[in-house]
Image: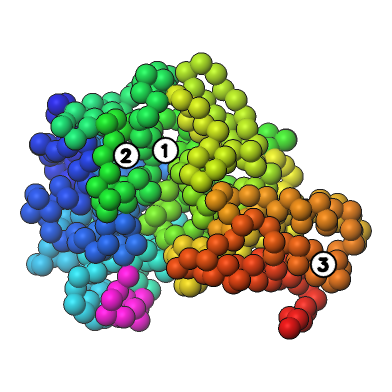
Amino acid sequence: MERLTLTLNGQHREVGQVHAHTTLLEWLRLEGLTGSKEGCAEGECGACAVLLVRADARGQAQYVATNSCLLLVGALNGQEVVTVEGLGTPGRLHPVQKSLAERGGSQCGYCTPGFVMSMAAEYYRDERSAFDLEALSGNLCRCTGYRPIRDAARALGQPDEHDQWSLRLAQGAPLTCPTVLTSEHGELRRCETLPQTLAVLAENPSAKLLAGGTDWSVDVNLRHARAPLTLAIDHHEELRAVHWTPEYVEIGAALTLSEIESQLNGRLPLLHDWTPQFASRLIRNRATLGGNLGTASPIGDSAPVLLALNASVVLQSAARERTVALKDFFVRYRETVLQHGELIRAVRVPLPHPMHARFYKVTKRRLDDISSVAAAFALDLDGGAVRRIRIGLGGVAATPLRAAATEAFLNGQPWNEQTVRDAARLMSCEGTPLGDLRASEAYRKAMLEQLLLKFYEQTTDQRVEVEG
């Protein structure tokens, strides 16, 4: 087994004996750093939040808050981690900790360390003018003490010029290290180059590809899943670039959703409006488009948006590269056209952006929840008629899909209430909606119909009365 090291709270540490599926949270607590708590083991509560020192698109170091329960410690070889114990001490509280203490932001205290770390990441965010409460969207307080936590966040000023954590960022972010970790539970490997990774994947086509880990690590934690070989790919620059051409924008499959949001900077409005509805900031700091599409979940939120945008995926193996339209990518439940040895290198979104585009997510909670039904619409009008419409759906079939019958009915037709009502009734039959714990079949069909009517309202500013 290779010797693994990382920088923990400013100190160089050897990781010691771990296996390929040991999470950072598990290792921290075994090392006596019990400030990070396990509340859910699936990245929903934020009690385990820590900071990573990562480089942004400009190469400058930044603190990124993330769930330590979803990080495999072997994939952090050579990286830098900050926990709540390192941020401040009882005798010398960090400004974030001090603000929370003074304003009564800690009740039972279980969630407090996670809130501290998410607040610290926002506290040190470059060019911050005011505290963005969205930074706390992945932290749950079971004592419902949100008001004092919010007050503590908004009371924070700017870091002092001599603040040690600010000075640390000026030194740059650590580089990733090639890694081979073998154990009786499997092997974790990080190759130096993408060609090396593809060569290993060609020899081991069943290897688990690890980028953000927000899906796979849940299986590791809750279902005790173990892969014979895990390949870390989140560092490959070929998977982390954004390229603009006159015909399309290509988005690297291993860019996190937070990085995509920052780099696109609103230039794809539908993606910009969708991103805040995807899980929480803690999850978006790790989750990737490649991972969300590669899992082929019928309720994955990115697929309906990208289907509406007529996106394609760029697939790469050691032997070749090919491009597949996303509407043809999903084959059946949790299966895709990916062949042995292939991975998703990038997602291509055609330009220009459609005239009107919206994403709707029907959930039991407004944010940070799994979709019962998801629908994305992209519409171009020519005068008062539909020149082109694309509709992506999730949660209504075994795979994400395009509402092909509804699109065909609407194309070339006048964009008016009667046409849309007729189309909405047709859309309620798209897919094969099933009843489950999240929603009944009848509810899903009703939502499909209502979402198209809602889209019509928002593109025309005309009120549509609900029939029946």
Q: Which residue is under mark 1? A: 59
In three-dimensional space, the C-alpha distance between marks 1 and 2, rounded to whole angstroms, equals: 8 Å
In three-dimensional space, the C-alpha distance between marks 2 and 3, rounded to whole angstroms, equals: 56 Å
Check if residue 151 falls in the magenta segment: yes
Residue sticking out furthest to the top: 319
In three-dimensional space, the C-alpha distance between marks 1 and 3, rounded to whole angstroms, equals: 52 Å
Residue type, label 2: Ala
Q: Residue at x 31, y 57 (%)?
A: 42
Residue type, label 1: Gly
N-terminal of the two: label 1 or label 3?
1
Of residues 104 and 447, which is closer to you in this image?
447
For label 3, the crowd category at 10 Å Cα-Cα, with few meaning under 14, some 14 to 19 and many 20 or more, is some
Of residues 158 and 130, which is closer to you in this image?
130
Q: Which residue is under mark 2? A: 173
Residue type, label 3: Asp
Mark 1 touching mark 2, by CB under 8 A?
Answer: yes
- Is residue 456 visible in the rendered image? The answer is yes
Q: Which residues are magenta?
A: 140-152
The secondary element bearing badge 1 is classed as loop
* x and y, in percent, of residue 125 in the image: 39, 56
The secondary element bearing badge 3 is classed as helix
Residue 460, picture quadrant:
bottom right
N-terminal of the two: label 2 or label 3?
2
Q: Is residue 427 left or right of residue 401?
A: right
* x and y, in percent, of residue 108 in the image: 19, 77
- Identify the image quadrant of the C terminus: bottom right
